[in-house]
Amino acid sequence: MRRRNFLKAAAAAGLVSSGLMSVSGRPLLAQAPEGLAEFPKGFLWGCSTSAYQIEGAVTADGRGPSVWDTFSHSYGKVANGDTGDIACDHYNRYAEDVELMARAGMRAYRFSVAWSRVQPTGTGPANAKGLDFYDRLTDSLLARGIEPWPCLYHWELPQGLQDRGGWTNRDIAGWFTDYALLVAGRIGDRAKHWCMLNEPSVHAIFGHGTGGHAPGMTGRANCIKAIHHQNLAQGAALKALRAEGGAKGWKLGTVLSLQPVWPVGGLEANYPASVMWDAVWNRSCLDPLFKGEYPELLAKDFAPLIKAGDLATIRQPIDFLGINYYSRMHQQPDPGGLFGTGYGSPPEGTRRTGMEWPIEPDGLAEMLVELKQSYGNPPVYVTENGAHFDDQPGPDGTVRDGDRIAFIRNHLLHARKVMEEEGVNLKGWFVWTLLDNFEWAEGYRRRFGLVQVDRETMTRTPKASYHWYADVIRKNGVPEGA
Ligand code: GCO
C-alpha cells in the first residue's frame, strides 16, 4: 500500500510538472484576447490574517491572556524578544485595514477570533466587549461588500485552559464547542462561512511536539493527543453548528496545512520517512475527517486515546475545505525526530523563499489532484498562500516585491491548470497575508504582507504585490507576463 501511494504521488508530480502546455501542445489555460489566464466566474478572491498576529491590544476590553502571550513573553522563545502586544494594532485600526482590502477589490476576508477575548479564561459566559470587536469588524466588512470568514481557532488558546491541560485534555472538545456557539450566536446572523480550526497538525507538531511554538509542550505523545483532541473538538463544534445553522445558511469548513511529502533525493531509503511524515502532517487530520480513520502507520499512537464514538464525531460533512499551501516537504530518516524523520533538501536547483522554504508551486497542483482522487473532490479554497522575502523599501519608499508577485502568480497558474485539466474543485483564493505581521517564533523579522507596516508609526504602505493582486482581482485572472 505504501508503494502504491508513492507511485501515485510520483505520477501526480509528473502530471503537474510538465509546464503549462498539454502534451498535444494545446494551451491549457483559458486565454482571453489580451493574454489572461482567466478564473471561473464567481471565483472568490480575498486574504487571510490571524488575531494574535495582527490585533495587538492584548489587555483591551477584558481580553484574557493566551498561550501566545505567555510564550512570547518567555525569554528566548521568539526572535528579538518580539511579542504580539501591539502587533499591527489592528484592534484599533481595523477600519483602515478593511478599507485596504476593499480598495484592492477583495470579496472575502478570513480572520480569526481570539478565544480569550470572548471567554477570558476559556470557559463561562461571554465577555460582551470582546465580541463587540468582531461585531464591528463584521459590519465594516459587509459595508464594503466583503464576506467575513471567521476562523474560530488560530493557535491562541486561553492560558486558563492551558493551565487545565489545554489540547492534551479531551474536555477541550466541549469547551471549544461552547465557545464556537457563543461566537456564532453573536455574528452568525451576518457571517455565513465558518472555519473551525487553522492547521491543527501544525499546531500539534510545533506547539505540542517540538515546543518551538506556544504552548511549548514537547513529545510524541503530547503531539498525538493535541491532534486527536483538535479533531474531536472540530467534529463536536461542526455538529453543534450544523444543528444551529441550517436555517441561517451557514457554510461550515475547516483549514488544514497540506503539503505533499517527498523522499529526499527520490531515494528508496528515504521513502518510509516521507510516508510517515505525510501521515503525521497531512493525513492525521484529513483521514479521520473524510474517512473516519487514522492512518495505519499511526494507529498504535492514537489507539489509547480513541473512545467509542470519537471517529464518528470527527467524521462530519463539511461544506468546504480550506487548504494552506506553502511548499512540499522533503523527508529522510532522523532518529532524533519526533516520528523518526527529519527535513532534508528539495531537488537541486529549487529556489527558496526568505524562510528558506522551497518554492514548488506544482506541489499545490499535486495536492489539489490528491484531494480529488482520494478525498472525493470537496469544494476547496486556498486559504493561505504567500511568501516572506526580505523586501525593503526603495529610495522612494515603495516596496517592489517582484519575488512575492512571481510566487503568488506561479501558484495561481499551477492551480488554474489542474482546475481546467483535472477538474479539481477550487473555488477561491486567500493570500497570506494582508499586512506584515507577527510571524510566530520568527517575530517581525519575517514579512509576508501585501502591505508594509512601519513598526514605529504603524503606517500601512501597499507594496507592488498589493497593486498586482488588485489587478488580478479586477481581471479575474492572471495577466500574462505580469
Ligand atoms: C501558519 C499560519 C500562519 C503563518 C503563515 C506563514 O501556517 O503558520 O497559518 O499564521 O503566519 O503560514 O508562516
Image: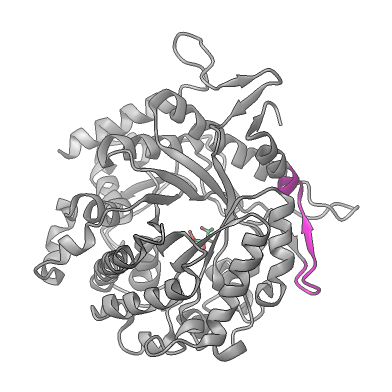
Image quadrant of residue 177? bottom left
Image quadrant of residue 292? bottom left
| As drawn, 205 above or below 280 | below
| As drawn, 362 above or below 161 | above
Query: What residue sits 90% from the left and 53% below the top?
Result: 395
Query: What residue sits 31% from the left and 62% below the top?
Result: 242
In the picture, measured across the screen, residue 306 lies left or right of residue 23, that is left
Residue 66 place in picture, x, y as percent? 48, 83
Query: What residue sits 24% from the left and 71% below the top?
Result: 225
User: In which quadrant is the C terminus drawn?
Assistant: top right
| As drawn, 89 above or below 335 | below
Q: Residue furthest left?
A: 308
Residue range (magenta): 454-467
In the picture, measured across the screen, residue 59 lies left or right of residue 2, that is right
Q: Residue furthest top?
A: 24
| Front position in the image: 32 or 406 | 32
Q: How many marks?
A: 0
Is 461 in the magenta?
yes
**Residue 446 visible here:** no
**Residue 436 visible here:** yes
Residue 228 place in picture, x, y as percent? 24, 67
Q: Residue furthest right?
A: 396
| As drawn, 350 above or below 214 | above
Colour mode?
Answer: one colour
| Front position in the image: 119 or 11 | 119
User: In which quadrant is the N terminus drawn?
Assistant: top left
Residue 45 place in picture, x, y as percent? 59, 46
Q: Residue furthest front?
A: 247
| Front position in the image: 160 or 182 | 182
Query: What residue sits 32% from the left and 51% below the top?
Result: 282
